[in-house]
Amino acid sequence: MRIVVLVKPVPDPAAGSERLGPDGRLDRAAAPAVVNGNDEYALEAALKLAAAAGEGSDVTLLSMAPGSAPETLRKALAMGATRGVHVTDRALAGSCAVATATVLAAALRTLDYDLVLAGVDTSDGVGGTVPASVAARLALPFLSYAARIEPDEASGTVRVRRISATGYDLLEAPMPALISCTQVLGEPRYPSLKGIMAARSKEIATVSLADLGLDPAAVGGAVPTTSLLTATAPPARAATEVVRGSPAEGATRIVDFLSQRRII
Amino acid sequence: MTAARPRGPAQSIVAAGAPVLRSAAVTATSPDHGPYQLTEEQQLLRDAVRVLADERVAPRAAEIDRTSEFPQDLRELLAAQDILALPFPLEHGGLGGDLLTVCLAVEQLSRACATTGLILAAHELGALPIILAGTPEQQTRWLPRLATGEWLVAFALTEAEAGSDAAAARTRATRDGDDYLLDGSKRFITHGSVADLITVFAVTDSAAPRHRRLSCFALEVPAAGFSVPRIEHKMGIRGSPTAELAFDRVRVPAANRIGDEGEGFAIAMRTFERSRPGIAAQAVGIAQGALEAATEYARQRRQFGQRVGDFQMVSAMLADMDAATEAARQLLYKACVEIEAGGPDAARWSAMCKLVAGDAAMRVTTDAVQVLGGYGYIDEFPVERMMRDAKITQIYEGTQQIQRLVIARALLGKDRAPLG
C-alpha cells in the first residue's frame, strides 16, 4: 500500500498570534509553523493503513510550501512517514486554492500511490477545496469526510465511511483514490524519540515548478483566482464567568444563568 | 575518587613560602571541557518530552499524588515513546543518549510530575551498574529488555542501618556452588516493588577493608525467598513505590554478579557520579514547574485592585525563584558535560549539581506556595505537591550533607574513598 498524504505547514493556532501582513497574505513570521491539525489526522490514518498492509508499504508527504517547510515536515516524518516531497518556488507565493491544486496535482503525477489522503481543511485558510480540486484534476475518485477507511488490495477498491448530515454514507471506489480525512479517524500519535532521531536523516526531495513542467506565469501569486478584500477580527469576547463548585451546584448556576437570559 | 591534580600556575595565589595545597583551587587546575551548547538533537528530544509531559503527564500528576499509585500507564507511555531507552547504548536497543540528554528528559517530565520524572531517573540508576561494569554477555542479557521498558530495574544499596554510610550494609551474599545466596534486607528502594530486575549490593567478604566488602548482583524477580514486606508512606513522590525488600536465601547465579567480588562499593560510587545529575534534573524540573505555576497565579490573581505579581514583594520572590532555577540548571548542564568528558572531578560535579539543584527546588517550591498564599496550601493548585516532592531531592542519592562532604574532599584533596 503506497499512500501520499498532503501536508501543509500552518501558523500554530495554539500560539494565538496568527495575523495577515499588509499585503493581505499570511504573515508567516507572526507565529511558529506546525503541521496542519487535520493533516496530522490524515497522516495517522495513513500510517495505520500502511502498517496494516505490511511489507512494501510506505507513506510519502507532499507539501507545497515556502522554503522553511522541511523544518515542519520533520515532525510528520518523526511520526513515521517514509519521505517527503517539498514543492517550493518563489513564484508560488500568494497562490490561491486553484493554483495550489494545479501544483499538487502536477506533483502527484510524478508519484506512485494507491491512496492520497488529505485533511478536510487547513486551519489557516479553512477553504477546504484543495482535496476535491486535486482529485478533479487527476480524475481520481474523491471520497470526502472520511470517518473510516478500509482498503481492499485484492479487489483494488477502498471503502470509506463518510460523515453526512444525518449519519454516515458508505462509499466504495476503485483505487487510486483521494480521501479527505476527519478527526473521527483517530488521534495522531506522538512522535517517539527514535522516530525523531530517524526523521533527521529521511529524504525530503525539493521540487521546483520547472521540475514539474509548470509555467510560473500560470500559477501562483501572478494569477490569483480570488483576492482578499478586507479582513476583520471577530469582536473581543466579553468577560468570562467561571462556575466553580460541585457538578450539582455548577449545573444549577448554569441553568439559572441561561434561563435568566431566556436562552432556555 | 579524586586524583591529585598537577600543580599549575594558578596556585600562585598561595603566598610564597606557604605550604602548597595538594589539590586546592580545583576549578583553576582541573581540565575544563568548555561551555556546552545544546545540540539540535538534544533540543528536539527535550521539546518532544516537554509536549508529552504537558499533554499526557501533567493531567495525571494530582491523581498520582492523591492515590499514591504507581502510574503504570505513564511507565508504558515512556516506554512506547522510547524515553526509557534514552540512557541505553545503541547496540542494545537504546538511544545512546548522553548524560545531558537523559537529564533534559528527566527535567521536563519532573516539571509536570516528579514521580514520573523519577521513573526514568531510577531506571537509569538501576541500570548503571550493568552499563558501567557488566560483561558484554550480561549487557546483552538485560539491557535490551530495559531499553524497551519491558522490564524496569531498581537499585538496592540502602539498608535500615546503612543510609549515608552505605559501606556498612549487612545484606550477605554467600557463595553456594555456581550461585550465591542473598540474606538480609534493603530499605527505601525506589521501584523495589515494581521492578523486574534489581541490582543488589551485598557483603561477600565481611573481613575485607570497608570499601572491599560489597559485591553487586543483578537479581531477576520474582525469585524464591524474595519479598516486599512494606511500601513506605511518604511525604512526596507518592506515586513512586519506595519498598523494603527482604532476602531469605535468595539464589542468584554467580553469572549475575556485576564486576568482581569486592567491587560493589566502587561500582555504586561510579553509579552515583552519573545518577546524581538525574536527581538534580528532577529538582530543576520541579523548581521550573513551581515557578511557572506561581508566575501564572501572580498574573491572574488580583488583590487591592491589582495583580499580585505587581506587588514588589511578590515580583522579587518570582525573580529570585527564576534566578535560582536557572543557576541550578546551568550548573547541572555543565556538570553533565564534565562528567561525560570523564574528567577526574566527576564526583565533585555530580555532588555540586545535586546540592545546588536540590536546595533551589526546596526554596523555589516553598516560595511558590507563599506566592499562592492559601491557594498554595491546598491541593487545588500543584505547588504544595511540588514542595513535598522537592524535599526528597535533598535526601536521596546522598543527602545534601554527603554532597558537601564529597565536594569538600575534592577540594581538600583527601585521598580517601568518597562516601556514598
Image (spheres, rainbow, N blue to C red):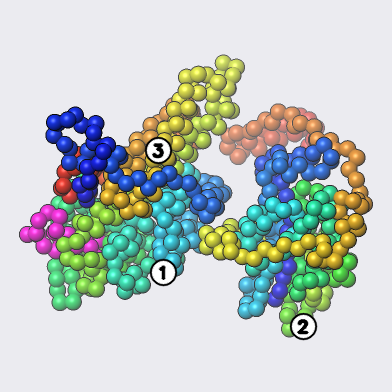
What's the chain of the residue with tag 2? A
Please report the residue visible at 82 percent of the width from the left and 43 percent of the height from the top.
A25
Outermost residue toward the left in this view: B207
**Percent position of residue A80, x then y:** 61, 65
What's the chain of the residue with tag 1? B
Q: Quadrant of residue B119?
A: bottom left
Q: Give the spatial CA distance, label 3 vs label 2.
A: 63 Å
**Percent position of residue B243, x then y:** 30, 54
Residue B206 on the magenta segment: yes
Location of residue B332 with respect to B274 vertically, above or below: above
Q: Are marks 3 and 1 on the same chain?
A: yes
Tag 3's secondary structure?
Answer: helix
- Residue holding disc 3: B328
Residue A50 versus residue B349: which sits nearer the camera? Answer: B349
Is residue B143 in view from this perspective? yes
**Percent position of residue B41, x then y:** 52, 55
Magenta-colored span: B200-217
Q: Amino acid under label 3?
A: Ala
Q: Amino acid under label 2?
A: Ser
Q: Identify the disc placed on residue B92.
A: 1
Q: Are marks 3 and 2 on the same chain?
A: no
- Residue holding disc 2: A155
Is residue B402 in view from this perspective? no
Residue A165 on the magenta segment: no
Cβ atoms under marks 3 and 1 closer than 8 Å = no
Outermost residue toward the bottom in this view: A154
Residue B96 versus residue B40: which sits nearer the camera? Answer: B40
